[in-house]
Image: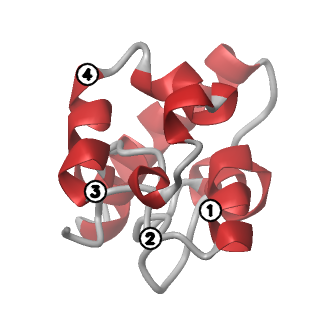
Amino acid sequence: MKNKIAYCGLDCEKCDAYLATVNNDQALREKTAKLWSELNHITILPEQINCHGCRANGVKTVYCESLCAIRQCALKKGVETCGDCPAMEKCQTVGAIVSNNPEALNNLKKAE
């Protein structure tokens, strides 16, 4: 499995924070910060939009680094992705992602 698939199955290479980081795209950082601020009802600054992927070495957004419950659980359990966890099918935490994103679920099932 490529290391740009997040613990939850999302493809980090499609994330605007990842794209802004690898392409050093300040306009995309600004656009993403504005959108994420509106969606989350908090202030997110363009300089906070830097991420190399939640399973990769390197910088991560504040959310991915320390607030994502899925990432924290996977790190605690020592699994590569939620697809490696025997409780995945019943997990409400990752269920919020995979129930709305068939691609994420497919990515996790490929890891099994």
Q: Which mark is residue 102?
A: 4
Percent from the top left, x then y, of residue 12?
33, 53
Q: Which mark is residue 55?
A: none
- Give 46 or 109, whichever is nearer the viewer: 109
Q: Amino acid at mark 2?
A: Glu
Q: Which mark is residue 112?
A: 3
In the image, which is nearer the foreground, mark 4 or mark 3?
A: 3
Q: Secondary structure at mark 4?
A: helix
Q: Secondary structure at mark 2?
A: loop
Look at the picture and state if 112 lies above or below 1: above
Percent from the top left, x then y, of residue 106?
21, 36
Look at the picture and state if 16 lies above or below 80: above
**Placement of the C terminus among the 4 image quadrants:** bottom left
Asked whether the beta carbons under mark 2 and mark 1 sit within 8 Å of each other, the answer is: yes
Query: Which is more N-terminal, label 3 or label 2?
Result: 2
Using the rendered image of the protein, determine whether residue 104 is visible from the camera's viewpoint. yes
